Amino acid sequence: MNGVTTCISFMDISIDNGFWNNRQRINSETTIYAVWERFKETGRFDAFNFDWKKGDPNTPHLFWESWDSDIAKWVESVAYIVAKKPDHTLEKAVDEVVNLIERHQDKNGYFNIYFTVVEPDQRFKKRSAHELYTAGHLIEAAVAYYRATGKDKLLNLMRKYADHIEKVFKIDHSAAFTTCGHEEIELALVKLYRTTGEKRYLELSKFFIDSRGKYSEVSWELSNARFAQDHLPVREQSTAEGHAVRATYLYCAMADLALEYGDKELFAACRRIFKNIVARRMYITGGIGSSAAGEAFTIDYDLPNLTAYAESCAAIGLAQFTRRMLYIDTDSIYADVAERIFYNGFLSSISLDGKSFFYENPLEIHPELLNRDVSVNEGKPGKQRFAITQRKEVFRCSCCPPNITRLIASIGDFLYTSDQRTLYVHHYISNKTETRLNGMLMEITQQTNYPLNGNIIVTAKGNGVGRIAFRIPYWCENYSFRVNGNLADVTKKKGYAYISLSPQKINTIDIVFDMKVQLIEASPNIQEDSGRVALQRGPVIYCLEAVDNGGLLRDVRIDPAASYELVPDNDFGVPVIRTTGYRRNTEGFETNLYRPVSGELDRVNLKFIPYFGFANRGESEMVVWVLKKSNN
Amino acid sequence: MNGVTTCISFMDISIDNGFWNNRQRINSETTIYAVWERFKETGRFDAFNFDWKKGDPNTPHLFWESWDSDIAKWVESVAYIVAKKPDHTLEKAVDEVVNLIERHQDKNGYFNIYFTVVEPDQRFKKRSAHELYTAGHLIEAAVAYYRATGKDKLLNLMRKYADHIEKVFKIDHSAAFTTCGHEEIELALVKLYRTTGEKRYLELSKFFIDSRGKYSEVSWELSNARFAQDHLPVREQSTAEGHAVRATYLYCAMADLALEYGDKELFAACRRIFKNIVARRMYITGGIGSSAAGEAFTIDYDLPNLTAYAESCAAIGLAQFTRRMLYIDTDSIYADVAERIFYNGFLSSISLDGKSFFYENPLEIHPELLNRDVSVNEGKPGKQRFAITQRKEVFRCSCCPPNITRLIASIGDFLYTSDQRTLYVHHYISNKTETRLNGMLMEITQQTNYPLNGNIIVTAKGNGVGRIAFRIPYWCENYSFRVNGNLADVTKKKGYAYISLSPQKINTIDIVFDMKVQLIEASPNIQEDSGRVALQRGPVIYCLEAVDNGGLLRDVRIDPAASYELVPDNDFGVPVIRTTGYRRNTEGFETNLYRPVSGELDRVNLKFIPYFGFANRGESEMVVWVLKKSNN
């Protein structure tokens, strides 16, 4: 396949300062421990002792079988953290989990807590039971831990499990279903293949991918095939459908296999689906899966703000999908989306202190509305299903927190790809790494405070052969590249600026991406956002919170003629933006809700904060999409 | 109690031409027959043969016990129709129903199909079973049929039933609950008292009203007391809560009793609640109960357009509440709300041809969104609960259609009240009637095409003594009154213009209410409507439909500087309004959903139709609240 590139692993990249260094520090010092504690408190670690039974006090929840996967993602996160900096406490904890897995794994390789402790006769009988999903996460953890530490015990256990899965599903066909109700195993098997070199795992992944959408699955409780992307064979799919996490995990594996097999038909399906997401089904924050019902994609342009589900795991899945597409097709549309996700819909999922998380990432919050007692309506106590106003430390189904920790720890994976003669720079993050161009070793450094500003200094030490290609971010209208002090001759292709290195020991490339404040409009097809604009600076989308601006934020009008004051903010790591706008006041509406338009507006000061930082100062009304004073 | 007035009954009013004459003709010639047919087809009439049992083919639905009430409201509607113009076919059908009721009524007076046929041992054991609700509607029907025809069989049967209810609830206290889970009996008993003169019925109504909110009701399945207005004793209530139909039927009875007993505390509660509705919980269409979940009021200012429930029966209930308040307090706030309901959220509930109905009356329709298959999300087939884009001929729970027919047939009840020296004119409808002022008989006529325009000629024949007070509609900024050709000396009080008649045989009063097109804004507290305006002319709210204007209507901008062309329209009976506006086009959004604002707008022609006429030309996108080009 043309255009194939290789990723530089995060393990070979040192993110030494700047925005993400700070985030990774919080992740490794605070978040990983906080998640550990919460998982201990909720019995998730104890579950690995296999002395649970259904109905015990502190009984695990309806997805008990996937608790294994919560721990697996935590293990994977630890692997990514200790790969960069030793942490014996964390490593010891992982080793203990691995020992428990070894102790309780079946002779035949099978490992699942629920289907060993509670329903051993139901193994591989229930398609929606997350068994292969859980297996996939355990495999990912095994691969990560082996690569990080060289310890191969878990890897070997999981190879045995994978062998068992191959036997049951591909050789004996003795399972009650062919493909899992929740994709994950497929991408994990590709990882297992790449680490072990054992092609059977790749072929098993291909077997699962090729089978999806072709068989009616008897044990599948949900009636609608789209929920698990079963509506069509994967090569015939063109739209992002169903449960958004399931969907993106599938697309990751499809892209992996397209690469491994040079499968152009599969890649074409991936590209169609990706374009459907970007052009019709994605929030400005990069969030996807707008519907809480089913945690799912719905129809084109159905992107409500207040009820936006936009699960953290789905954003992560989409980011991982973009990364895999990039290896096949160096087009900035992929890293643009990853960047949109990183600085907005992903980063919003974790509190600034690193201790609490959003499962859902709404683009609008009205506490009164969300917190209202709907028991009067439903005949039972409780809030709205989408009553999300604050981050939580742990969830009953707590898939998101360890997914967040593993992405932060391994974000370096997104930075670079290379082919024989070109290094591709996808993201702007202070770091050091090495690569080979035309066979010659080269040391690469980026120095930048991005996204605080758009200035980046890249140095390439070594024989100046080959090229470096820099992604020109989608939001950037004006930019400049200076190579060794001189304005560079840039070739632009598919969103990348290609610069040929000078044949000298050190090439220094000064990049300026002009990071002005922009007012963004959504397509008229997104009727939710009509008449409204979002404020964006660089990759960061901003929002208004009542804690700064008072309530009734949907009635605030931004003045497009007003100037913007950037005020440094240490908590956010990017500036807050002060400007002026307008709002109506409620005077005259005490006894009536409706009246002829008066046209009177009060001038008000506005303070925008980065969207990712919302809900860090207590429960507060919030909006991303703001009225514009002159509505044209 | 001060300010008490008496209603002129619709039976004494002849609505001889104009807008409502047309509607009443459709009602008596088409709608009452259409509802009859649908009720026959669905087994509602057969049910009165008492040969059903649970589980039979064509088994009645979960509210079987309230099917009696569907027929009762149909009987009541027939009564109002035959009161004005004989219809032997309808009258014969009613007589047959009455005979069936007589045949199957218990010796003790009890009558309910479900609790006789299916669960006879559960009588008055289940508070939410609508038994007293059904009894109330039967009583209303009996009163109406007696007053219309002089036939007293049903009235006597229902007196017997009311006596039984008194015994069970007030004397023996042998029921499993004290107050019904769905109010209705209370207002019906007041009617029964007024027709029979039997004060026990009034006292029984008062017993039910006084009991509500004071006892915890064991058999009440729903946990939240507000659903059935049980959260507080009625005299302590200040906000409209819970199921909106239940609520308004309760408020009707509260107002009735406030009048009958001169109960100022009860009236004060009614007035607080009414003000809460008008100032915080009512759509611009007069619709109330914004939430489909529970068909209920939610919190202040929670008035979503797309998911507006705004049940037809709730609008009717609110209108009936305003009428009762008016008898105690001649303030235009009541008839203003009734007018808002009549020409908008009530009239929308029935198709122009009179054959189909809305149960819910949304203020915005997006067929694609509402019709989307959500089985992918819910794991079961089906549309959104609020998937309302078209009127239907009958509903499983078909309370609305016969409620609509009875209101149209009896709308004359809303027109006039009087006290000894003043006739109060609340609505402008062509009609003839008689009244006594200072003891002298006077013939009153209104000639008007209202709401086609705001010109009304009122003549008062007889000795010109006393006054006529005219409501100045809330929407009217400029008006004039000429008495016998001369500009009148008008005294304005609480929204009414008081005119003293000249001592001559005929007084002619020419009224002009300037009916210009207005752009209406909602309170900033209704965040849903921020940045948007509604177009109103006279009492009629307008909307845009895709069938006239193309889709993406939430993105259309009205130009407040543009002129309005009124185009006569026979179907609607009021003009459609043509004007120009703006919209963005979707060019440039093919591959991206978001971009920096371009400011480009296309000028477009717009055609507004009256809201009440939406969805009469096939399924179509619709909006009431439209963006305004200059958003100040």
Image: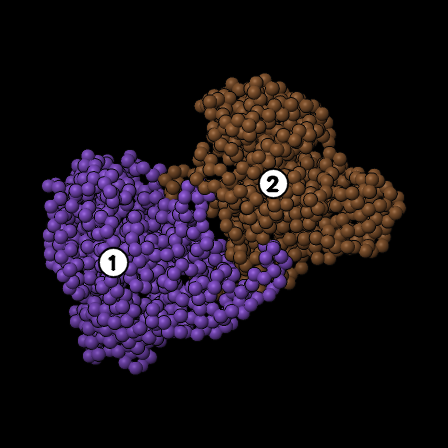
Chain colours: A purple, B brown
Q: Which residue occupies 43% across, 52% down?
A: A370
Q: Which residue occupies 56% across, 26% down?
A: B167
Residue A602 in sight in this render: yes
- Looking at the rendered structure, the kind of residue marked 1 is Ala
Q: Secondary structure at mark 1?
A: helix
| Image quadrant containing the C terminus of chain B | bottom right
Residue A34 image label: 1
Tell me, yes or no, whether dots 2 and 1 are on the same chain.
Answer: no
Q: Position of residue B133 (x, y in %)?
A: 55, 32
- Residue on which the image places disc 2: B254
Q: Residue furthest bottom?
A: A485
Q: Position of residue B378 (x, y in %)?
A: 38, 41
Front-most of residues A326 and B322? B322
Residue B582 image label: none
Does residue A105 appear left or right of residue A207 in this picture?
Answer: left
| Image quadrant containing the N terminus of chain B | top right
Residue B77 in sight in this render: no
Front-most of residues A341 and A119? A119
